[in-house]
Image (spheres, rainbow, N blue to C red):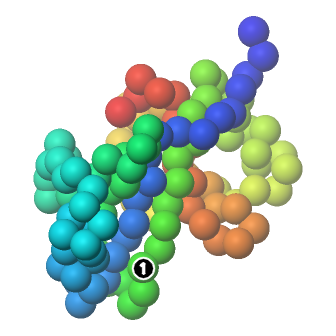
Amino acid sequence: MSMRIEGGINIAMKIPSHQYEATVRFYRDVVGLKPFAAKAPAIGFELGPNRLWLDEDPTMSQAEVWLELFTDDHRGALDRLEKANVVRCDAIEPLGEEFRGGWIMNPANIVHMVREPDAW
């Protein structure tokens, strides 16, 4: 079996505190997306087949979007990406020792979690 990387289902928005409540209201009240709280304090919204997570981050000055990639072999995928000079950024948010995945950045500095689907 060859190692694969494919799009995941989670999209995270890391939002500064001064914009957080207005952003929650936008997706809930203006757009009308269905919210859920499976990982409180983060608020999630159904976004078609995806899940949009809004995470409040008081240390940020502007919002960021973080994406998810699934793989059947996280070590192989992360090794392949590192060999292609993709930046690893595991210190950005700890995932724990047992987590089967890690963090990378694309050339435009968009954070991606690369993980095995059953690792969450």
Residue 7 occupies quadrant:
top right
Q: Is residue 116 left or right of residue 16?
A: right
Q: Which residue is mark 1?
A: 63
Rendering coords of residue 88 (x, y %): 64, 56
Closer to the camera, 83 or 115? 115
Please state, as top left, top right, bottom left or bottom right, where the N terminus lies in the image.
top right
Q: Is residue 90 visible?
A: no
Q: Is residue 100 left or right of residue 110?
A: left
Where 12 sits versus 95, above or below?
below
The amino acid type of the residue labelled 1 equals Ala
Looking at the rendered structure, the secondary structure element under dot 1 is loop
Where 50 sits versus 56, above or below?
above
Q: Is residue 21 left or right of residue 46?
A: left
Closer to the camera, 53 or 113? 53
Residue farthest toward the right in the current orientation of the protein: 84
Q: Residues within 10 Å of mark 1 (few under 14, many from 20)?
A: some
Q: Is residue 21 left or right of residue 31?
A: left
Q: Residue at x 82, y 56 (%)?
A: 85
Q: Is residue 110 visible?
A: yes
